Image (cartoon, rainbow, N blue to C red):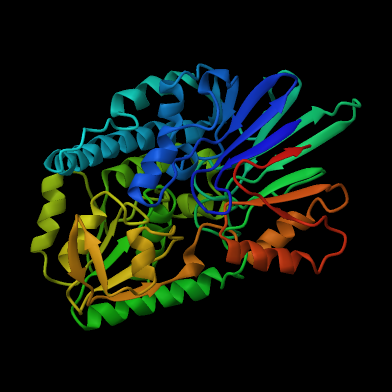
């Protein structure tokens, strides 16, 4: 078996890996690269292989940096099945259509500027229609169900604990000598004791582990400590009469936040101020959380049993759907919390809320997730004073608070446990989905365990014989 790393190599975006075995090709994830606009367009438009030659694909989870280029893959000739958990299939449906809508709008805006410069118009990487055309190729799998995805390769999807439906991908096969082998692809590793979802399953009896290292340099503070930081930031902002603006991924982070905030208001830890989820995608995703109860942990089931209500039905959370409802939030001048997508503040309604609130020193911008290089979210997290939104420059007066402990990614300690869990059988440990600082720190930490193979920090296009 041969593995080639084509995405999220020495960066945290655009996950895409090619497995070749018995003359067949299996793609693991097909994510959109997010970064500088021109670079992103070029990378996402052009695949490093012929999509028509891919026989099948497995999607670890529905986040756009893992799923976002699937419609383009199909558009360019891929006709095979796309395997994913039941919840991931439903989430991919709404996310890819939303992504197509954003790409269409972005290219319209860009083409206006290009025409003024005398440049030819560009086509969107894909459209909403392209996203719809890709959905018939999805095939649902239950967790732990075994499926021969290409000849000689049996796949299982196991709980990753990252977002609803997220999975690690386990591939069992025979090597050239007829010896059983196991390859374990982590996808994005979640955390223990995150609200709603079950804990991630650690690798077992794997010879090769391809593992993310997003927070390889940071042992996460406990969820309780992060929660306290969050509450302090809210109280501080409310006391000065400001608003709390939270860029949040529509899937996963938003649902965790609404859980936390509902509990905080109910326990009178923060004032009973409006909490608004202003993202049609997040609203639709929350509906799917209600549907896919097979992904819930025991604590959530206990909550449902005790309160005789669904785990996401909170009386103090306001969900908006229409543009008019979103615009009306500008007329609210009292303290409030606005949670809106996208999580890296690159597109979506969050840009309007940032534009309208960033120059008011009473307000707080709360960064609670990983921010890729060159995104607006990273610039805010880096405390930059001047940023551009919709092409215009704004001077930031709002406080920026970054809370890493609320991340849905595993921290350094869990990543070490993840690697160690197959130490008796492990032959190769390959790191992806992490910047150099994080990967280097994790490699140094893993070096303390002499019974582990030396990790490889994979480069883009690097191949491995498994």
Name the side, left or right, on which 102 lies relative to 329: right
Which residue does the image show at 22% across and 77% down from the upper left? 397
Q: Nearer the viewer, residue 372 or 97?
A: 372
Residue 304 location (% of width, % of height): 46, 50
Q: Nearer the viewer, residue 248 or 67?
A: 67
Residue 229 in sight in this render: yes
Q: Nearer the viewer, residue 60 or 34?
A: 34
Q: Quadrant of residue 166?
A: top right
Q: Is residue 451 above or below residue 75?
A: below
Q: Residue furthest front?
A: 118
Name the side, left or right, on which 424 lies relative to 103: right
Q: Residue furthest left?
A: 331
Q: How many marks?
A: 0
Which residue does the image show at 86% across and 47% down from the upper left? 425
Q: Quadrant of residue 174?
A: top right
On-image quarter of the N terminus: top right
Residue 413 in sight in this render: no
Name the side, left or right, on which 131 lies relative to 158: left
Which residue does the image show at 73% across and 46% down from the upper left? 209
Residue 399 location (% of width, % of height): 29, 77
Residue 129 location (% of width, % of height): 30, 23
Q: Is residue 452 above or below residue 98?
A: below
Q: Is residue 188 above or below residue 260?
A: above
Residue 253 location (% of width, % of height): 42, 55
On-image quarter of the C terminus: top right
């Amino acid at each position: 078996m041969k593995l080639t790393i084509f995405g999220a190599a020495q960066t945290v975006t655009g996950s895409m890996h090619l497995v070749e075995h018995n003359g067949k090709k299996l793609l693991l994830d097909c994510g959109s690269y997010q970064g500088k606009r021109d670079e992103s367009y070029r990378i996402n438009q052009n695949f490093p292989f012929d999509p028509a030659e891919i026989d099948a694909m497995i999607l670890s989870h529905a986040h756009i940096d893992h799923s976002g280029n699937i419609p383009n893959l199909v558009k360019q000739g891929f006709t095979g099945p796309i395997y994913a958990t039941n919840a991931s299939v439903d989430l991919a449906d709404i996310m890819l259509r939303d992504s197509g809508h954003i790409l269409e709008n972005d290219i319209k805006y860009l083409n206006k500027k290009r025409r003024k410069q005398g440049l030819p118009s560009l086509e969107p990487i894909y459209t909403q229609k392209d996203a719809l055309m890709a959905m018939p190729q999805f095939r649902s799998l239950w967790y732990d169900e075994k499926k021969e995805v290409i000849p000689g390769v049996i796949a299982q999807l196991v709980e990753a604990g990252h977002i609803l439906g997220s999975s690690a991908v386990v591939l069992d096969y025979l090597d050239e000598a007829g010896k059983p082998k196991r390859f374990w692809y982590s996808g994005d590793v979640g955390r223990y004791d995150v609200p709603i979802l079950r804990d991630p399953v650690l690798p077992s009896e794997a010879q090769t582990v391809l593992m993310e290292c997003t927070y390889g340099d940071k042992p996460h503070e406990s969820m309780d400590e992060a929660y306290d930081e969050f509450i302090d930031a809210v109280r501080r902002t409310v006391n000065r009469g400001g608003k709390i603006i939270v860029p949040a991924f529509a899937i996963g982070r938003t649902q965790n936040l609404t859980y936390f905030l509902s509990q905080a208001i109910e326990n009178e830890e923060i004032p009973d101020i409006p909490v608004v989820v202003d993202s049609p995608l997040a609203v639709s995703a929350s509906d799917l959380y209600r549907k896919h109860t097979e992904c819930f942990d025991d604590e959530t089931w206990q909550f449902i049993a005790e309160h005789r209500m669904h785990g996401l039905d909170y009386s103090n959370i306001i969900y908006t759907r229409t543009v008019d409802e979103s615009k009306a939030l500008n007329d609210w001048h009292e303290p409030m919390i606005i949670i809106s997508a996208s999580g890296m503040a690159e597109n979506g309604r969050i840009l309007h809320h940032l534009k309208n609130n960033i120059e008011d020193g009473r307000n707080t911008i709360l960064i609670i997730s990983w921010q890729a290089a060159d995104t607006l979210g990273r610039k805010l997290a880096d405390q930059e004073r001047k940023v551009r939104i919709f092409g215009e420059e704004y001077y930031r007066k709002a406080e920026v608070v970054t809370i890493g402990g609320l991340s849905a990614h595993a921290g350094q300690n869990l990543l070490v446990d993840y690697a160690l869990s197959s130490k008796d059988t492990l032959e190769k440990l390959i790191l992806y989905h992490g910047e150099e600082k994080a990967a280097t720190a994790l490699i140094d930490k893993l070096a303390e365990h002499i019974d582990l193979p030396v990790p490889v920090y994979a480069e883009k296009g690097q191949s491995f014989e498994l």
